[in-house]
Amino acid sequence: MIKVEKMKIIQQTEIAENIFKISLKGSLVNEISMPGQFVHIKVNTANDPLLRRPISISSYDKKNQIMTLIYRASGLGTRELANQSEEIDVMGPLGSGFPIEQAEGQTAILIGGGIGVPPLYECSKQLKNKGFNVIHVLGFETKDTVFYESAFKELGPVYITTADGSYGTKGFVTDAITEFDLKADVFFACGPVPMLGAVEKQLNHIPGYISMEQRMGCGIGACLACVCTVNGPELYKKVCTDGPVFRKGELVYG
């Protein structure tokens, strides 16, 4: 059930250059059903910014009613969010996440780019609990923007790439998959659209799930601001309610 709640901020920390980790406490956490879902946050009570900001859920703890979000402070709304310290207006959980129960095989590869990395953390934890060997390939712009490397390492091997070569493999996540000849039975990916298209093409031989990043207005399927093109008779789907996670082969890139 979707709720709107004033959630208590219990921690907010900058963990990399302009990348913030915020932990929130409230009963809304009880409604989260799968990794990869997101929340819509109103950063203040004023009219500017008017719209909420969609932010993926990085991890959650239902027992203690705590969820953690990781976001990049790059615009007016997210910079305002970074200044908050007491409570925040949250709507959610929203969207369909990664269907962990449908994944089959022994090894899963999780591929994230930039601020698409956070939802993969809870996905990896749940795959690990299900008995999967999990491999992580995480792409960033520079060394200064790398985050959560040690957290992912507690779950399985981690391969970092940076576009400028300042840390890990120089290049993109697809370069690391090729360089280290990484094999898996299923993949899960989240990041920029060009990255998602390249990953899907490279891993076309195995099943996979893609989490789409898209600008949103309402977050509940009314404004149609986040529609994306898909294969099949429907032609279009809404990222906020039909996604953000889609099966490999559903999305049309470019």
Image (cartoon, rainbow, N blue to C red):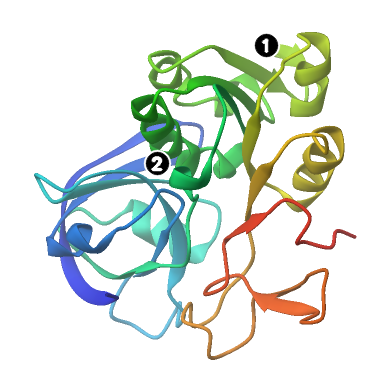
Q: Which residue was labeled with disc 2? A: 20
Q: Quadrant of residue 203?
A: top right
Residue 90, percent from left and from top: 28, 69
Identify which residue, 9 or 195, lies in the foreground.
Answer: 195
Q: Is residue 113 visible to us here? A: no
* SS type, badge 2: strand
Counting from the top left corner in percent of width and height, residue 152 is at 44, 21
Between 36 and 40, the one nearer to me in the picture: 36
Which quadrant of the structure image shows residue 111?
top right
Q: Residue at x 57, y 62 (%)?
A: 244
Q: What residue lies at 13% left-to-right and 51% top-to-bottom? A: 65
Q: Nearer the viewer, residue 32 or 104?
A: 104
Q: Amino acid at mark 2?
A: Phe
The residue at the far right in this view is 254
Give residue 9's position: percent from left, percent from top.
18, 52
Numbered circle sitting on residue 140? none
The residue pinned by badge 1 equals: 168
Residue 162 picture location, percent across and down: 71, 22
What SS does tag 1 mark?
A: loop
Q: Local crowd at mark 2 within 10 Å, few (<14), some, or many (≥20)? A: many
Residue at the image position 80 percent from the left and 27 percent from the top: 174
Horizontally, residue 50 falls left or right of residue 142, namely left
Residue 145 lies left or right of residue 205; in this view the side is left
Residue 64 visible? The answer is yes
Q: Quadrant of the C terminus?
A: bottom right
Quadrant of the rendering where the N terminus is positioned: bottom left
The type of residue carrying mark 1 is Gly
Q: Residue at x 42, y 15 (%)?
A: 150
Task: Determine whether 83 is above or below 132 in the image.
Answer: below
Q: CA distance from mark 2 to mark 1?
A: 22 Å
